[in-house]
Amino acid sequence: MDNIDRIACAVTAASFLLLMAGCQPARDRSANGPERTLSAPSIRLGGLDQHLSEGMAYSDVRRLVFEDGWAPVVDPDCTENVVGSDYKSACSAHPELDGCSICKNLPELSGCSGDAYCGMYFSKGPRRLHIVAFGDMRDWNVGGDRSGFSVTGWDFAGIK
């Protein structure tokens, strides 16, 4: 691993940790009781949540999400979040780096940490779906048991 890759990994990890520190689970703020955290099993979204399970290949989950009418939420800072703040010069010098093209392949990607966790966002009307996947992001389009990029969790927001 050369110095650019080491710097990119360190900056990516720090960026992802800062990003995740500001994220909180969606809350039900209805007047009918105490505030509670919304979780995937307690929400019914046309059955999508019934088909999601931890460990599924991200490619398979992504297909289900698109089939259910969800659209990717594009993060304009994705490449910076994945590669680091010096992404322009890093990607100019090393366009073959996976992080330099992954945001074009996965417009829903917001960022990845240095320890291989990635966050993706989708929207459907006022609703928002956040998916976390772990592993080799180069397997984003590999389905089934052969995939090295699998879903570790998800949550919904904007649900009433």
Image (cartoon, rainbow, N blue to C red):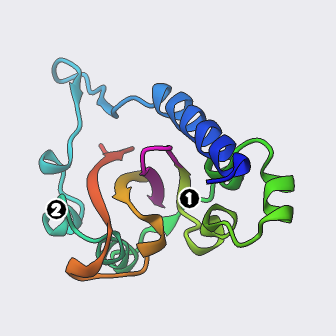
Determine which of the numbered discs, if any, sits on residue 53 in the image: 2
* Nearer to us in this view, 105 or 49: 105
Earlier sequence position, callout 2 versus callout 1 = 2
- Quote the CA–CA distance across marks 2 and 1: 22 Å
Figure check: 5 above or below 24: below
Q: Position of residue 72 (x, y in %)?
A: 52, 65
Q: Is residue 90 left or right of residue 31?
A: right
Figure check: 57 above or below 114: below
* Nearer to us in this view, 16 or 109: 16
Residue that label 1 marks:
73
Determine which of the numbered discs, if any, sits on residue 153 in the image: none
Element on which disc 1 rests? loop
Tell me which corner region of the image, top left, top right, bottom left or bottom right, holds residue 6: top right
Q: Position of residue 114 (x, y in %)?
A: 50, 44
Q: Inspect this view and state whether residue 61 appears.
A: yes
**Which residue type carries mark 2?**
Ser
Name the residue at 20% across, 49% down: 40
Q: Residues within 10 Å of mark 1 (few under 14, many from 20)?
A: some
**Which residue type carries mark 1?**
Val
Span of residues in magenta = 112-124
Name the dominant secondary structure of the magenta segment: strand
Element on which disc 2 rests? loop
